């Protein structure tokens, strides 16, 4: 196992034992934080922050200084050539020739993958839009591990904006990787995105029990879904008359509170969405299930977490933020190859699912307007690429932002004897669509695109709703 020269774009890039090796080095460095100044001497970290940041940027920069390395950087898109219309791939190539490692925060989902593909040096995702924030997850897990010893079998409640909160997307997958159970408590309308849920079920093998919002046990602790790991919860599930939710809420090990990410709301979304959601304060935490709960928050807080929790021993968020420096020191020195990871026994099954890739560059594009692959400056060179995560119904996952969707129309490259009259396209849910071999699939968003490429409607397309 080597972490040298690797990038960290999503939390899936690290196995559980690699995460353990980051923790082990972080622990060692935390014990003598000012004694590490020879670890990355002469190395340069480029700190590229195109969205506001206090903790992440400053802890990365502090970490590199603590390791004896140097930092160059920008924290404002207007001061770079991106403002002149330069693509992020060109920026990545240039900065990759100046620095040994890049740390990127960017509003476009999938931006870190593009930069990692072009930089030629390791790239760390410090938050890409509402997609992921894997280094925040490392320090979140590190905090829970330090306090509880292990993550396996713990019950973690995720609270607030689970739709746009990128920290929660990385955390949910990492908790599943380490065998923790989860209670999802989203503000109304800000539920965990379907692509994260799908990954949990298909790749991590757990189960989701969703709840009828109108039948909540207790309005002050509104759980809308429960994630059960493939192991311990099954034992609970096998016991008749045991309500899993009741069992899990008996003792919540950590309550991970997040703010509403109003800046990511689409035009149609009401900015007041979370108003009726309970505020986490000492009164709220007086319930039996929170007796030993660690209260966590990636920060900044706005009004979802009361200042009265600051003096409560259960409040962990300042300690959590402080862990950002040793965790990022460990990560930087491992990816730069300045330290070797310790080896750990493979204790947790890693997700093994391999999906076929679709990258024909035909007319199917990611429907997520925040995805890097649909931004004007990036479409000049980026070929949209998708994983086919399900054949029936045909479902794609964008490799950049991981958004899942269904294309509108399909055709086959294997049009019989190449005659135009057989070059037909079908509705995605038609019988014909299912008979096309994966390697022959051609996908379209709209009928117009299929026709522009010389395909004719199959007999059944006329039954379809209007062109999108
Ligand atoms: C988070 C982020 O930027 O995603 N902050 C952080 O990095 N600690 C959370 C947030 O902005 O709400």
Image: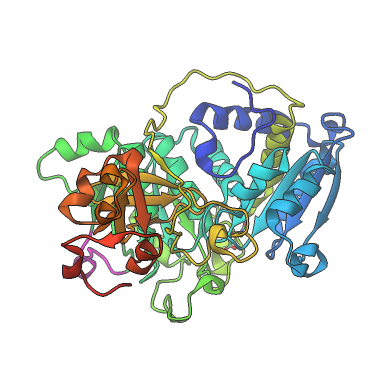
Say left or right for 279 vs 55: left
> In the drawing, does residue 8 fall left or right of residue 282?
right
Residue 144 visible here = no
Q: Is residue 33 left or right of residue 264?
A: right
The quarter holding residue 151 reads: top left
Front position in the image: 197 or 329 = 197
Q: Residue at x 52, y 26 (%)?
A: 17
Residue 164 at what x, y percent from top left?
48, 63
Quadrant of residue 443 within the rendered picture: bottom left
Is 358 located above or below residue 212 in the figure? above
Which residues lie in the magenta part? 211-219
Q: Is residue 374 above or below residue 233?
A: below
**Residue lying farthest right?**
42
- Quadrant of the rendered image holding ligand 1: bottom right
Q: Quadrant of the C terminus?
A: bottom left
Nearer to the camera, 308 or 14: 14
Number of numbered labels in the structure image: 0
Tell which of 326 and 2 is nearer to you: 2
Q: Position of residue 52 (x, y in %)?
A: 69, 65
Q: Residue 301 in the image: x percent, y percent?
A: 58, 67
């Amino acid at each position: 196992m080597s972490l040298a020269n690797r990038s960290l774009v999503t939390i899936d890039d690290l196995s559980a034992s690699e995460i353990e090796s980051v923790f082990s080095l972080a622990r060692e460095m935390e014990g003598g934080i000012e004694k590490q100044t020879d670890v990355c001497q002469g190395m340069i970290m480029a700190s590229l922050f195109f969205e506001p940041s206090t903790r992440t940027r400053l802890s990365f920069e502090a970490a590199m200084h603590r390791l004896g390395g140097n930092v160059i950087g920008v924290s404002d898109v207007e001061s770079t050539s991106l403002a002149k219309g330069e693509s992020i791939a060109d920026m990545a190539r240039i900065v990759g020739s100046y620095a040994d490692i890049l740390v990127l925060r960017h509003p476009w989902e999938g931006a870190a993958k593009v930069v990692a593909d072009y930089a030629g040096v390791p790239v760390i995702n410090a938050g890409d839009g509402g997609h992921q924030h894997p280094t925040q997850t490392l320090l979140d897990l590190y905090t829970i591990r330090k306090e509880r010893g292990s993550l396996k079998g713990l019950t973690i409640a995720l609270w607030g904006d689970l739709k746009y909160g990128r920290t929660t997307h990385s955390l949910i997958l990492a908790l599943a990787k380490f065998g923790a159970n989860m209670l999802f408590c989203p503000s109304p309308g800000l539920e965990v995105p379907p692509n994260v849920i799908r990954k949990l079920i298909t790749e991590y093998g757990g189960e989701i029990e969703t709840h009828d919002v109108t039948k909540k046990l207790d309005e002050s602790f509104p759980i809308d879904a429960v994630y059960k790991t493939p192991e311990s919860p099954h034992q609970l599930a096998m016991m008749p008359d045991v309500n899993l939710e009741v069992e899990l809420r008996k003792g919540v090990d950590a309550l991970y509170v997040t703010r509403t990410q109003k800046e990511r709301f689409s035009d149609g979304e009401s900015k007041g969405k979370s108003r009726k959601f309970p505020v986490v304060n000492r009164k709220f935490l007086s319930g039996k299930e929170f007796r030993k709960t660690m209260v966590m928050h990636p920060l900044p807080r706005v009004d979802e977490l009361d200042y009265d929790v600051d003096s409560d021993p259960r409040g962990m968020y300042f300690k959590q933020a402080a862990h950002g420096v040793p965790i990022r020191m460990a990560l930087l020195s491992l990816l730069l190859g300045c330290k070797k990871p310790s080896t750990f026994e493979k204790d947790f099954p890693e997700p093994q699912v391999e999906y076929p890739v679709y990258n024909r560059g035909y007319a199917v594009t990611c429907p997520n307007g925040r995805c890097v692959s649909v931004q004007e400056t990036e479409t000049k060179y980026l070929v949209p690429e998708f994983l086919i995560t399900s054949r029936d119904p045909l479902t794609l996952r964008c490799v950049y932002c991981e958004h899942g969707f269904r294309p509108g129309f399909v055709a086959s490259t294997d049009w019989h004897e190449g005659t135009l009259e057989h070059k037909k396209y079908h509705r995605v849910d038609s019988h014909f669509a299912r008979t096309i071999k994966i390697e022959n699939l051609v996908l379209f968003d709209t009928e117009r695109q299929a026709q522009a490429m010389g395909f004719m409607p199959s007999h059944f397309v006329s039954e379809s709703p209007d062109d999108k």
